[in-house]
Image (cartoon, rainbow, N blue to C red):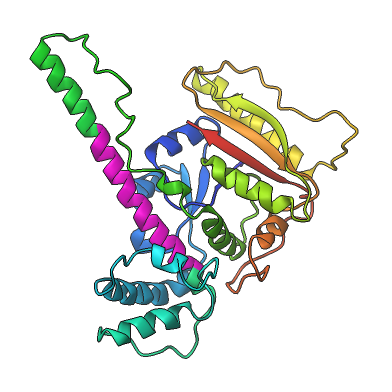
Amino acid sequence: MMQPVYFPFTSVSRGLMDASSGFFNKMAVYQVLSASIPQRMKAWQGDKRLDIRLPLQHHEKEITSILREYKTWAQHHQGGDISFFKTQGGQIPFFDDSSVAQIRKQIKSRGAASTPARKTDSPGLYPGIFLQMAQDLDEEYREIKEDLESQAVQEQALMKALKGDELFEMPGDLRSGITPGDQEGYMISERMAAWARIMLADDLVPPLLMTSHPMALDDLVERTTRGLQDIQFIQTLEAPVGDAGDVSLCKETLAAFLKDISVLAWDEEKERPYCTWDCESTASGVRLSLYVIPGVTPRALLASCVASGGSDAPGGNEDGGAIRNTVVGVLEF
């Protein structure tokens, strides 16, 4: 079964889930803490539309404890949020061996409660801490955005009622100017490094790395130009429409194509392969742009995103022997 892996984020919105379902029956996403999985994502997991991966379960107690310490510290520190980690001595990403020690030092200096120092602090903790904090912020911004959009809709309905005109439309896009900013675009490179460590801790072999943010693709392009093969555009597909049987056939065709691309012995002199499917497309604007990094396996690519090139957590198996290339998809909706 074709199961793309969403990167480098852990929060999945309803719009993203619906867009992905236009091309795939199931999508994989990584989470850090089982207790912090959003309810909507749990529902999609129950519907078998979402595969939630938790490769750091063996660190959950430690991560929870450290986050609790940090939140206590943040109450006594102006601007106590994820921006703190961005400023730690220029260390990018922040999750090095001294990070937790720095937080504890700050906590103690302010007289806040602190847990005893642990005998061992695994580097696997820090990417998990970063991603969990990033997800918390993403969720807060998502709620703010939804509240603002709901308020704009209510204002539109109120103006229609006041004017007595059901066809009245307020000028401009209801959503323009009311979003709280591009939160997902924040610290993409750091997110990528942290997410890569989590991914390398798992034994999942991704047939397709999929993102919804163009900046994530830009980050990969920058990384692949540092000694790896150049990333190459294949094509853009629009989400298919029709009855269930037709759409299912389109998904099967795409899955077979992506599998073939991942194992293809790439030859620049031969004609580039394309996914040819006889599928009626929707006008909804849901599109999937496909790219390939020939000669670079997904795990080799992710290792290049991590300074040490490795992972300390269980798993981390090599890619399947047949896989030769990394396939990347950018989902627009």
Residue 150: image quadrant is top left
Q: Whole-percent x and y of residue 285? A: 49, 23
Compared across the picture, whether 312 is left or right of 15 comes to right
Examine the rendered structure and indicate whether residue 298 appears above or below residue 309. above
Q: Image point 65% across, 42% down: which residue?
A: 328
Q: Where's the N terminus, which quadrant?
A: top right
Residue 133 is covered by the magenta coloring: yes
Q: Is residue 37 visible?
A: no
Residue 233 located left or right of residue 51: right
- Residue 288 pos. (x, y %): 58, 31
In-front residue for pair 37/295: 295
Where residue 249 sits, quadrant-wise, is: top right
Residue at horizontal 31 percent and vertical 74 percent from the top: 68
The image shows residue 201 at horizontal and vertical percentages of 59, 66
Taking depth in this image into account, of 101 and 43 the one nearest to the observer is 101
Residue depicted at x 68% and y 62%: 303
Q: Is residue 164 above or below residue 235?
A: above
The image quarter in which residue 83 lies: bottom left
Residue 132 shown left or right of residue 115 in the figure: right
Is residue 144 positioned above or below 159 on the image?
A: below
Question: Is residue 40 a member of the stretch shown in magenta?
Answer: no
Q: Is residue 146 visible?
A: yes
Q: Residue at x 76, y 52 (%)?
A: 296
Residue extent of the magenta highlight: 127-149
Assign the magenta stretch its main secondary structure.
helix
